[in-house]
Image (spheres, rainbow, N blue to C red):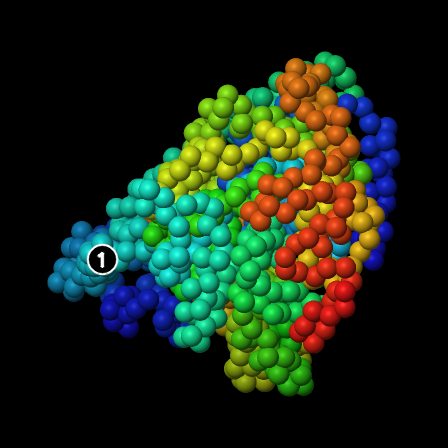
Amino acid sequence: MSPVSNAVPADAAPVAAAASPARQGSAPPPKPRFPRVNATIDGAISLLSLIGLGFLKPVVAICRGDDPRAHMRQLWLDLAAPVLAIAAFLLVWSQVSQGIQTSLGQIPGPTAVWEQTKALWADHLVQREKAVAFYERQEKRNAEKQAEDPAADMTVRKYTGKPTYIDQIFTSLKTVFAGFLLATLIAVPLGILCGVSKTFNAMFNPLIQLFKPVSPLAWLPIVTMIVSAVYVTADPMFDKSFINSAMTVTLCSLWPTVINTAVGVGSIDRDLLNVARVLRLSKTTQLTKLVFPSSLPYIFTGMRLSLGVGWMVLIAAEMLAQNPGLGKFVWDEFQNGSSESLSRILVAVFTIGIIGFLLDRVMLAMQSAFTYGPAR
Amino acid sequence: MRSRICASVICGLFVFTNVIAAGKGPEKEQLKLGFIKLTDMAPLAIAYEKGYFEDEGLYVTLEPQANWKVILDRVITGELDGAHMLAGQPLGAAVGIGTKADVVTGFSMDLNGNAITVSNEVWELMKPGITKDAQGLPVHPIPATALKPALEKFKVSGKSFKMAMVFPVSTHNYELRYWLAAGGINPGFYTPSDVTGQTRADILISVTPPPQMPATMEAGTINGYCVGEPWNQQAIFKGVGVPVITDYEIWKNNPEKVFGVTRAFADKNPRTHVALVKALTRAAIWLDEKNGANRKEAAQILSRPEYVGADYRVIANSMTGTFEYGRGDKRALPDFNVFFRYHANYPYYSDAIWYLTQMRRWGQIPEGKPDAWFVETAKKVYRPEVFVEAAKELIAEKKAIAADFDFTSDGFRAPTKEFIDGVEYDGRKPNAYIEKLALGLKGQQKIEGGNVAGK
């Protein structure tokens, strides 16, 4: 495999190539002087390339003095070209944005967005200070209450101020992972069933095909109504809004994992199954030792797609159902209609993009960590 | 099923412990209240920012909501403990217009604060017919008759004239209809089969959430709207339209928003309800005291993204005693936003009954009702006793003065003629009032086959 393949974004590649790695990238240096150090460096680099820092590899190689020409070319592809593209994007953006007047003023350029990013962070710090003051006031009030009536309820109340931008990010992450986890727990067994049994596949396939293309916007009202009817407790452990968004994420992100798992299980090597039959392995052993491990790459590809879908769906769900999170932030800013609103929405757009990218990288890392064999 | 049984057992325990602990403190300390991004949510923001909620031992989180429907639904399901509501919402819920539910109010949040804005295109068509003063500025109030040239023009070119308000039972809907009807324009009737209220309408009125009004008008989907601030002043700043009349001119000192909670919440947490009303009353006092000296600070607070979030200058335009009609046509209107004066916070039955008369007038209440029914329905929803108790406690704590409150009232304001058409309203005689109004259903009239039938 040529080193160029490293530059291909992993998500554009098919299943096997998606996991393809940086490990077998370039030929090893002719005479490693410090084999253990080099091995550690290689290990670290393959990890870095997983999280999108693959450009460090040629840098290290150049430093080590192997084949500088080839690696310079690699560096150009991995680092210089993307940076150049981003710079060009920023330039075009700042030029174009000056020309578009909306009723909320000009479309913000990169500088305005950066200003708002800082403002949101500053606001986060201010809110944290306010929270500290809030707890101090509460402590004082509780102490007075206790002095009057020792039996009084001393529950410490959570800070009542608004969630900051950073809080909204974490709420969104929590929700997407809850929904995604639930989706995986349902989808993997379902997918295995469909892959193992032709009958099951015939039964479920029409349903899967029917529900797969349904948009979150269609699910949401139904989920909301069902949750508010079924989830009735006096002291709920989770907010209804959290359950609404998480369920919507589950319903929409289920399908890629189901389908990929089914395909993975179905495309298992016939020879392996024959060997299993010869060895008279029990069904359970076949499943755990053969079917499951060999379909892992497919399952993870499905999960990666699912998480991507879930993240996209979540933002829409939060916006529509007014559930806390980044989607609600965007909606609230849109409603504010102040002269800073558009810049703040753009901050959110970039945050959503960056987090989506990081989530994908995390899944890719997990995929390669859990996958055996040469496909790794 | 099982979780329901569990839930009711837990509920039962709660009620039980509440009875034991029925001392002074609020039953429920941690509360979530909803609001819509409008300047009249100010009492909530001020009560929070000035620590009035905490003074009452309440830990309140304020959360903006997308629209009035969401607010009502979330209060009913208990996701919100209480909310900033349209005065017509608890009443509409009691009558069963749209959602049927038991929502009560012990605190009226403000008077006035709305306006009607038309698009630039409509304004250009209206302009020639509007009387001007010596300086060449339009004479206010502008009657709805000034809209007629625009209506004609739209009719000739085969377009329908569309206006928006914020909710079917909103103050805005009734104010807009009142203004149009007073100018001889039929805003349309609601019938059991036409819940959009466009039967026999000269102007098609529909619902748009407040913050989206300017954008929707800019997109050309609507030609005008009736909404609270800052969305009329926003139209001027964005250059998309011109406010023609405020609700202060349609009905001087009309009751506007209320603070609503479910009846179940009010019954279960009476101390909490009073504590909330106390905090809100203090905020209302702060907003109106010293001849409006605090309004600038209030506008600053409201302009933060977690509250109304519009630019300060837009909010300040109407919050600080002025109102900008056309661009540059800024006039003094000190009573445009009233939060405390004129007994703004007292939940008068007569205020509730006015809204009920309008619901009857436009067919949302499809059949005629006796006067007693109007009073009974108002008493189901409006709880002056909660407000009076809160006010008395504030006076005892020296946080308010007795002279500012209407303790002798029996719940009815004195009859008033201060409407744009000068028709006198007496809350004790709702049916007689409906008879006097120019357009609308009277007595036992109904809409049958698109026509007014019966008498």
Q: Secondary structure at mark 1?
A: helix
In the rendered view of the protein, which quadrant contains the C terminus of chain B? bottom right
* Left or right of A214 on screen, residue A22: left
Does any portion of residue A137 appear in the rendered image?
yes
Amino acid type, residue under disc 1 in the picture: Gly
Q: Nearer the viewer, residue A255 or A51?
A: A255
Say if B6 sits above or below B455 in the image.
above
* Left or right of A211 on screen, residue B373: right
Protein chain holding label 1: A
Does any portion of residue B218 appear in the rendered image?
no
Question: Alpha-carbon neighbours of circle 1 within 10 Å: few (<14), some, or many (≥20)?
Answer: few
**Place of residue B344 in the rendered image (x, y in percent of width and height, measured from the top left):** 62, 33
Q: Nearer the viewer, residue B90 or A368?
A: B90
Q: Residue at point 41% right, 45% down?
A: B139
Say if A153 sits above or below A113 in the image.
above
Q: Residue at point 34% right, 52% down?
A: B239
**Place of residue B315 in the rendered image (x, y in percent of width and height, measured from the top left):** 43, 39
User: Badge 1 is on which residue?
Assistant: A99
* Left or right of A60 on screen, residue B88: right
**Place of residue B103 in the rendered image (x, y in percent of width and height, measured from the top left):** 73, 46
* Left or right of A90 on screen, residue A257: right
Q: Residue at point 74% right, 40% down?
A: B349
Say if A235 sits above or below B397 in the image.
below
In the rendered view of the protein, which quadrant contains the N terminus of chain B? bottom right
Q: Quadrant of residue A354?
A: bottom left
Q: Nearer the viewer, residue A264 or A376?
A: A264
Q: Residue at point 56% right, 73% down?
A: A214
Q: Quadrant of residue B204?
A: bottom right
Numbered marks: total? 1
Say if B222 sits above or below B246 in the image.
below
**Place of residue A283 in the rendered image (x, y in percent of width and height, measured from the top left):** 68, 76
